[in-house]
Image (cartoon, rainbow, N blue to C red):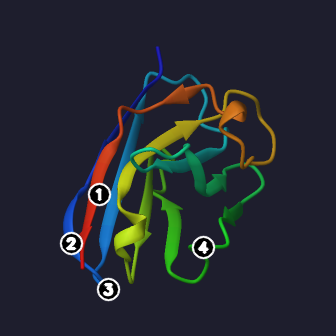
Amino acid sequence: QVQLVESGGGLVQAGGSLRLSCAASGRPFSGYAMGWFRQAPGKEREFVAALGWSFDTTYYADSVKGRFIICSNNDKNTVHLKMNSLKPEQAAVYYCAEDRIPRRPGTSQNEYACWGQGAQVAVSS
């Protein structure tokens, strides 16, 4: 059974940085896309970034381009989200997710079958 466990959340001042990590276990094959989504209170879950293993591609939401970076360890069992220049409006629970079909990474949460429990990110102004 695939498990995704996020870590690295916390409180940071506006303009600061955090790095989230997502450790995957129990998967027979690591050639699936992985993504990060976030959900703020009272809002829908939204796409943040995605990484495609097989196609070596990355996608970012327009709101985080140039400030967030998604990457992985060489073993492809851990994916990171480095968040720079954080803004208060980016405070949310950040979720790691993994697709179960070998294809290009998607931006819709419906394309991801496995989800972590979420990591809280708070940004003080």
Pointer 4 residue: 63
Disc number for residue 15 = 3
| Residue at mark 1 to residue at mark 4: CA–CA distance | 16 Å
Under circle 3, the secondary element is loop
Which image quarter: residue 31? top right
| Residue at mark 3 to residue at mark 4: CA–CA distance | 15 Å
Under circle 2, the secondary element is strand
Pointer 1 residue: 121
Q: Measured from the top left, where is residue 64 in percent x and y?
A: 56, 73
Instruction: Residue type at mark 2: give it.
Output: Val
| Residue at mark 3 to residue at mark 2: CA–CA distance | 8 Å
Instruction: Residue type at mark 1: give it.
Output: Val
Pointer 2 residue: 12
Above or below residue 15? Residue 46 is above
Q: Measured from the top left, where is residue 88 in percent x and y?
A: 34, 72
| Residue at mark 4 to residue at mark 2: CA–CA distance | 19 Å
Disc number for residue 101 = none
Residue 125 placement, left or right of 19: left
Identify the residue at horizontal 61%, vertical 77% (top origin): 65
First along the sequence among labels 3 and 1 = 3
Query: Could you tell me if the residues under marks 4 and 2 are in contact, i.e. CB atoms within 8 Å?
Result: no
Residue positioned most to the top = 1
Above or below residue 78? Residue 65 is below
Callout 2 crowding tier (Cα within 10 Å): few <14, some 14–19, many ≥20:
some
Under circle 1, the secondary element is strand
Judge by depth and name the residue closer to the eye, 114 or 24.
114
